Image (cartoon, rainbow, N blue to C red):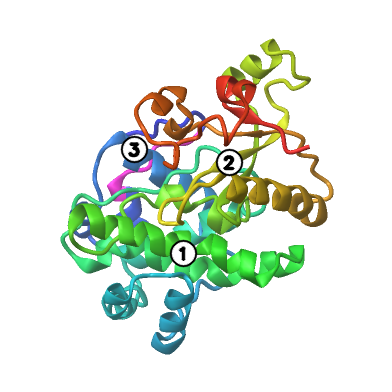
Amino acid sequence: MGATNAGLAPVTIDDVARAAGVSKVAVSKLLTTDDETSSGLAQLALTGSPNFNVVLPDPDDAVSDLLRLAVPHEDIDAIVRCLPVLRPPGPLRWLLERCVHLLAHCMDHPHTGRRFPTFPNQSKPVRRYFYVLVFLAMLPQLRMLHRQRGIPEHVSWLTLTDLGRRVAVHHRFHGVGGLRDPNSLVHHFTGTLYQLGRLQFERATLNKRLGSSIARAGLPYRPGDPCLSVHIPDYCGPLSPQACNNSFAAAREFFARHFPGERYRIAVCESWLLDTQLAEYLPADSNSCNSSTVSPSARSQQTTTPS
């Protein structure tokens, strides 16, 4: 299998087995052999082994962290039982260290294209919860960054509770705990996304399609300009106009204070919740963005300016 990312050398299961000091059969049972996994392995090989100790917390500290991350109570015992499996050398430990290093490598920088490898099935708890443990091991590095940036404690932990929310979503769709889409949490655990009240704001840049659309609308922004990408998390209550206004007001102050070297004058959101057709089918008090939530121009461009 070959890597799909330009400039990255192909990484095979043989390479992983050799680096981890285990048999190819053991790695083959662990990882898929598709292009996406090859690309993820290439990313890990490119960043290499970490230049810091990747430490998993002891059980007591792990429980405390998991509770603060809003991981459902019914998952905590199963996650803690996975800790000893990832401590000794082997393919899982090799993956854990390099996944943590991948996060550290792009920490505090807007993130594009980073992908984790995937497992062939999720039958064993250690596979379902593997990336929960990756993020748990990354927590000390991220919390240090938050302290250096002066991020308030309540914002730091509110942002990271998306981990527990994603575990709850896994329960909802699969009937068991786990984390099937770890890539959706990379922004949270690299310091590029923060939850401020009801909404989440990601440090980003305008892509070509959206930037060109905004420029054609007459706004003074172009592809590549800095922007805040707005995310709408689930399980967070009503998406009221006042809650959204409060979040945007908080974002103005937050990014000016904690990221003074970055100027964010525009925020963008691409979500099915902004589809104006929803107003024809849903009641006025639904979570869709109707005329009381955003202006017609904002709806048509799927953008809103925070200043």
On the image, the x and y values in percent for residue 30 come to 23, 56
* Rendered residue at 28%/48% (across/down): 13
Name the quadrant containing residue 304: top right
In the image, which disc is placed on residue 230? 2
Q: Nearer the viewer, mark 1 or mark 3?
A: 1
Q: Which residues are magenta?
A: 8-14
The number of numbered badges drawn on the structure is: 3
Q: Nearer the viewer, mark 2 or mark 3?
A: 2
For marks 2 and 1, the one nearer the N-term is 1
* Rendered residue at 46%/64% (across/down): 135
Residue denoted by label 1? 135
Name the residue nearer the viewer: 240 or 227.
240
Kind of residue at disc 3: Glu
* Rendered residue at 55%/64% (across/down): 158
On the image, the x and y values in percent for residue 183 come to 43, 48
Q: Is residue 1 visible?
A: no
Position above or below: 24 against 97: above
Residue that lies at the very extreme toward the front in this rendered image: 284
Residue denoted by label 3? 36
Q: Main secondary structure of the magenta part?
A: loop
